[in-house]
């Protein structure tokens, strides 16, 4: 698969769908990420978590085992079906599910967020929209759909957390370098979250050493923001 450069067109994302469906036929990750442990140490149990671009769902299963109500969503039907089989075989029930949702579709995302907000309010919980290694997998247009939808629908106190590759990572060596990535300008994202989308950024860090994989130490940013 070749690396696709794009200019605000959904080309990279379209190629990416085929890439991820193929990838998930071969790969399965069991262990939670370091970002998942970091977030767990910072949130209360009265939080309902949705993981957008959840991949093999290792983080969502870990949140579930800690007692959180969770849903993982991803555009890849391949991985959603496989995740639902895994939790069925493990005997996990209620409070956890995986669903196919394409974040680039404003109507699909908006309907899903609305359902989850109603569930969270019914359970007297706040919502955490969690994403690891997702923002750099989508194009600028899809990022705008996501943030605009969250800004419109989340209530004060709901949370957004993200770990992603930044522009400083663009020229570093990669283990997998055969698919679409958009290296995110994290300073600009923080500014947009605060000035355009009305979030209060509670934590923002960037650098290396956060998530080392097979000798690759990517340059990442971590953000936790609260709707205000
Ligand atoms: C780099 S993987 C990260 C997976 C997982 N969060 C992790 O940390 O292992 C990016 C994921 O985003 C998903 N994805 C990409 N574009 C998407 C979209 N428009 N809507 C929903 N999921 C998408 C891909 O299918 C893939 O599973």
Image: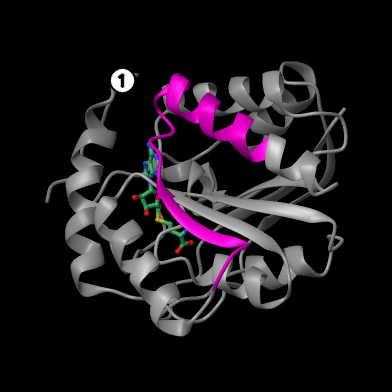
Nearer the observer, 2 or 100: 100
**Relative vertical location of residue 95 with respect to residue 17 in this rendering, above or below:** below
| Residue visible at 54% across and 28% down in the picture | 146
**Residue 85, image x, y percentages:** 34, 71
Q: Residues within 10 Å of mark 1 (few under 14, many from 20)?
A: few
| Residue visible at 30% across and 61% down in the picture | 81
Q: Is residue 7 left or right of residue 18?
A: right
**Residue 88, image x, y percentages:** 41, 75
Using the rendered image of the protein, determine whether residue 159 is visible from the camera's viewpoint: no
Q: Is residue 113 magenta?
A: yes
| Residue visible at 72% across and 65% down in the picture | 68
Q: Is residue 25 left or right of residue 147?
A: left
Nearer the observer, 40 or 80: 80
Can you say which quadrant of the picture contains the C terminus? top right
Q: Is residue 198 left or right of residue 179?
A: right
**Residue 201, image x, y percentages:** 82, 38
| Residue visible at 73% across and 72% down in the picture | 67
Nearer the observer, 167 or 41: 41
Q: Which residue lies under the disc numbered 1?
A: 7
- Dot 1: element: loop
Please tell me in which quadrant of the rendered image residue 210 appears.
bottom right
Q: Which residues are magenta?
A: 93-117
Please tell me in which quadrant of the rendered image residue 103 appears.
top left
């Amino acid at each position: 698969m070749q690396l696709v450069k794009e200019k605000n067109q959904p080309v990279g994302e379209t190629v990416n769908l085929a890439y991820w469906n193929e990838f998930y036929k071969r790969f399965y990750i069991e262990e939670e990420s370091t970002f998942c442990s970091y977030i767990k140490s910072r949130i209360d149990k009265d939080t309902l978590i949705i993981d957008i671009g959840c991949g093999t769902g290792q983080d969502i299963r870990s949140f579930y085992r800690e007692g959180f109500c969770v849903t993982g969503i991803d555009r890849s039907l391949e991985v959603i079906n496989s995740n639902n089989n895994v939790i069925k075989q493990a005997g996990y029930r209620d409070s956890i599910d995986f669903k196919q949702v394409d974040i680039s579709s404003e109507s699909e995302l908006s309907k899903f967020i609305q359902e989850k907000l109603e569930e969270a309010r019914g359970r007297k919980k706040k919502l955490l929209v969690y994403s690891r290694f997702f923002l750099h997998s989508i194009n600028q247009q899809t990022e705008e759909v996501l943030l605009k939808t969250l800004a419109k629908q989340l209530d004060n106190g709901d949370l957004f957390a993200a770990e992603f590759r930044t522009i400083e990572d663009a020229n570093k060596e990669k283990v997998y370098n055969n698919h679409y990535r958009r290296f995110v300008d994290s300073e600009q994202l923080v500014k947009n979250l605060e000035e355009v989308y009305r979030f209060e950024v509670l934590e923002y860090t960037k650098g290396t050493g956060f998530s080392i994989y097979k000798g690759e130490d990517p340059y990442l940013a971590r953000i936790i923001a609260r709707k205000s």
